[in-house]
Amino acid sequence: MHRYESYKPSGAAWLGDIPSHWDTVPAKRLFREVSEKNHPTAQLLSVTQEQGVLPRDQLEQRVVMPTGQLQTFKLVRSDDFVISLRSFQGGIEYSAYTGLVSPAYTVLRKQKQANSRYLKHLLKSRSFISELNTSVAGIREGKNISFSEMSYSLLPIPEQSEQEKIADILDLKTAEIDAAIAKKERLIELLDEQKYIAINNAVTRGLNQASPVQATDVQWIGTVPSHWSVSRAKFLFREIDERSETGNEELLSVSHMTGVTPRSEKTNIYMFMAEDYSGSKLCKPNDLVFNIMWAWMGALGVSERTGIVSPSYGVYRQRREGIFNNWYLENLLRSSAYVAEYNRRSTGLHSSRLRLYSHMFFDMEIAVPPREEQNEIERATKARLEKTDAVISATRKELEKLTEFRATLIESLVTGKIKA
């Protein structure tokens, strides 16, 4: 693809120069904000960054909708656009459906003739998202896009025929790229599943599957190698409740995906940040930390550093130093049998409200191989999975390139940097 013959200043810093025959139009001339309510029988919609606006029952993972009377929810009509609570991250979403969204969202309806498919790509482009961030309101509890501010943003508008041509190209090319991305994501999922199974078997059965086993009298653990011991957690760990006086220590996050990691490494910038972290729980290297609200998903890990976590988390320290290899302990406690047991023991009205309290963890049995064997399980399992990890790493890099190419293609076409 080539550049246009000539360009002119757009008048907008985020756009730079645009093709000489293009116009720029303030958003307020393209859209008007609407707030239709009192449609309680309309279907519920969910606003996502990845899939746009969809009926809630079409999502693979159910999204918790805000509570409240449906009469207060806003009606979105087909061909409307929605500013969600995370639009500052991923742009404005297009809806092909009619239904209800949270009252906290802003619904925009086109005022003048423009190609919705072109606008759909434009309002998700990276440079426009940067422009959106100049219209952000709110600091403490998240960010909201103010349409009154955004309405003055200049948008590039080619002639109708060119809008349609750009939309046709992007619809075709992004569909091809999305299909390639989906295949690579599926490959990573399959490889991760293989890794999980291999690690799961190693930490619960040992490396020698033919070694003699013994019954544990613990139904959910079953059998273990005959030279392993089984002890209740209360004999292996003690709870630690040391508190930070200043809250200035490194803030740590505990998840089922990454274990215990610095909050600063998280890419989700929408995570709530408190003004004062004094009184948070301290944890030190080798401490075991449970996110008690998400233990049923395996949200736990062994910390590699000193830091602070939520006061509601469980922090545990080995009663005798060196009982466990940290890698072995974390993977054992995140294995399928243990996670299933957290689910069984946790209390709460439904899954998103389950809690695994300290006395529940202390009452659990834990299989303990000799420390030397734990070290060997870690070494041998990592060596066995080196090739798998290499394939996953290479596939992730390919994913990054595809994602970057997709974003660059959209950006270049909707802003006129390359000719459609």
Image (cartoon, rainbow, N blue to C red):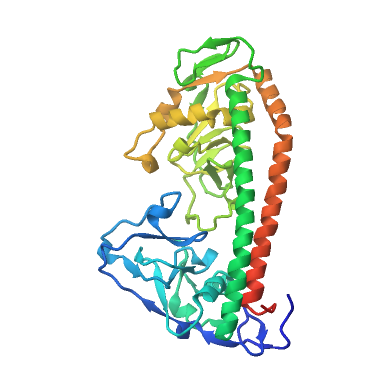
Is 82 left, or right, of 246 in this rendering?
A: left
Tell me the quarter of the picture where residue 55 sits.
Answer: bottom left
- Check the image and report above or below for 112 versus 36: below
- Quadrant into which the N terminus falls: bottom right
- Check the image and report above or below for 308 versus 168: above
Q: How many marks?
A: 0
Q: Nearer the viewer, residue 328 or 56?
A: 56
Q: In the rendered image, is residue 98 in sight? A: yes
- Check the image and report above or below for 311 versus 415: above
Q: In the rendered image, is residue 285 in sight? A: no
Where residue 215 appears, as percent x and y from the top left, is 50, 11
Residue at point 45%, 30% (across, down): 340
Where residue 412 appears, as percent x and y from the top left, is 66, 74
Where residue 333 appears, as percent x and y from the top left, is 53, 29
Tell me the quarter of the picture where residue 371 sits.
Answer: top right
Residue at point 67%, 86% (across, down): 19
Residue at point 71%, 42% (across, down): 391
Q: Nearer the viewer, residue 384 or 165?
A: 165
Residue at point 37%, 42% (across, down): 353
Where residue 121 appears, as percent x and y from the top left, is 56, 71
Q: Nearer the viewer, residue 81 or 85?
A: 81
- Check the image and report above or below for 135 versus 372: below
- Quadrant into which the C terminus falls: bottom right
Is 271 left, or right, of 19 in this rendering?
A: left
